[in-house]
Amino acid sequence: MLNPTLIQHARSADLLQLAGQYTRLKHIASSGGGEWAGPCPIPGCRCHRDGFRVQPGQKRWLCRNCTDGKWQDAIALVMRLESLPFGEAVQRLAGSFSPNAAVQPVPPSEPISVPPSTTWQKRSQEVIHRAQELLWGQAGAQPIPWDVPDPQSGIAKPASLSPLNWLRGRGLRDETIRKFKLGWIPRDTRDDARHWGMAGKPLFLSQGITIPGMVGETCWYLKVRRPRGKPKYLHLRGSRPALFMANDLASHMSIVFCEGEFDAMLLAQEAGDLAGIATFGSASQHLDVAAWGWYLLHARRFLIAYDVDGKSENGIQGLLTLRHAVRATIPQLQPEDKDFTDFHKSGGDLRHWLSFWLANQEGKA
């Protein structure tokens, strides 16, 4: 028998985020906490284009055809979408949650395609908001030592830069920095794991630029780019792999995969109206078709534009399995250039680069 607490947790799932993985929804009303409408995602349903309704504040949905206009919960939606029995739908929605999760966490090696818990979400949003305040305040304007590669030798040498100027130095404009909710943690800190709905030792929040891995309003991961030392990037414990900028892909027939978030943000800033831009955050992360494939179903072509450093081949090959996917080479204007940021800083025109590749692929898909 399923634990009642587990069932209640499943029924409390974020319905807007859940349904948004299968269909495009638009906000149509503010009453009752808000209502969204769109085509029904349930296989075989033939209701009209706005017959599927979601009221996330009420934790309910309906379809004028599939449910005869009667409201249903998140468990019923997963049962219909995935053709699952009740128990499996509960387990799918509940993810890593259990009444004893504080003492029996899910092993980190287990593949997970659901976002972190609601407690983790709440705490991450608090950290993101505070990090944004710090970045745009005095802390973000204070110069600190950064490891910056020497253009000639490639060896990292310390340079004094404020966090804001470091981001601006990568070509990111202030409106882009704000759009992607980048922030700053001025010193290494530790936070009680219970604040995140987790057990064990406190969570380590490294000094550095915070990069929230947002899908809609849901934070799947929180990543920190450290100013010095290795590794350069750290994921906060409890983070889950996600497709960065997934929600911006639906309106584009062409999608460009970058290797990391900073390159993706820069390309979106310069040419995001020409194509959808996305990244899994590193070349080592691979496409989870079950979790993210629906975001790509409408696209007619994919450009794989990973770093020119000889270390990205496995990630590139994994994405080249997509239909009409091609490798798109980033020019090296300087011998040490390896990614979009280097290309841009060396004087390259990212918009022209993308326009060239899209024209080159037109008619091939």
Image (cartoon, grey):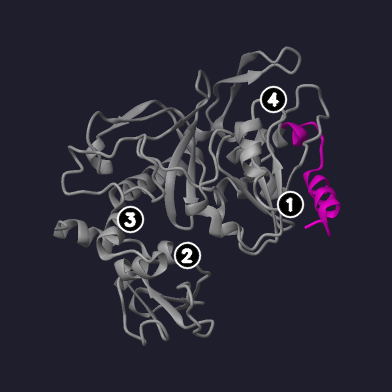
Residue marked by disc 2: 20
188 horizontally vs 4: left or right = right
Check disc 2 and give the amino acid type.
Gly
Q: Where residue 111 sits in the image (x, y, percent)? A: 40, 42
Say which label, 2 or 1, has the lower sequence index.
2
270 horizontally vs 83: left or right = right
Residue found 25% across the figure and 28% down from its top: 201
The magenta segment: 342-365
Visible in this render: residue 173? Answer: no
In front: 348, or 98? Answer: 98
Residue 357 lies within the magenta run? yes
Q: Where residue 105 sits in the image (x, y, percent)? A: 25, 38
Disc 2 from disc 3: Cα separation: 16 Å
Residue marked by disc 1: 271
In front: 145, or 236? Answer: 236
Q: Classify 10 Å Cα crowding around label 1: few (below 14), some (14-19), many (20 and above).
A: some
Disc 4 from disc 2: Cα separation: 36 Å
Judge whether 50 appears above or below 251 on screen: below
Say which label, 4 or 2, has the lower sequence index.
2
Tell me where residue 106 sits by quadrant. Answer: top left
156 horizontally vs 199: left or right = right
Disc 4 from disc 1: Cα separation: 26 Å
Say which label, 2 or 3, has the lower sequence index.
2
Screen quadrant of the N terminus:
bottom left
Judge whether 212 appears above or below 333 on screen: below
Residue marked by disc 3: 92
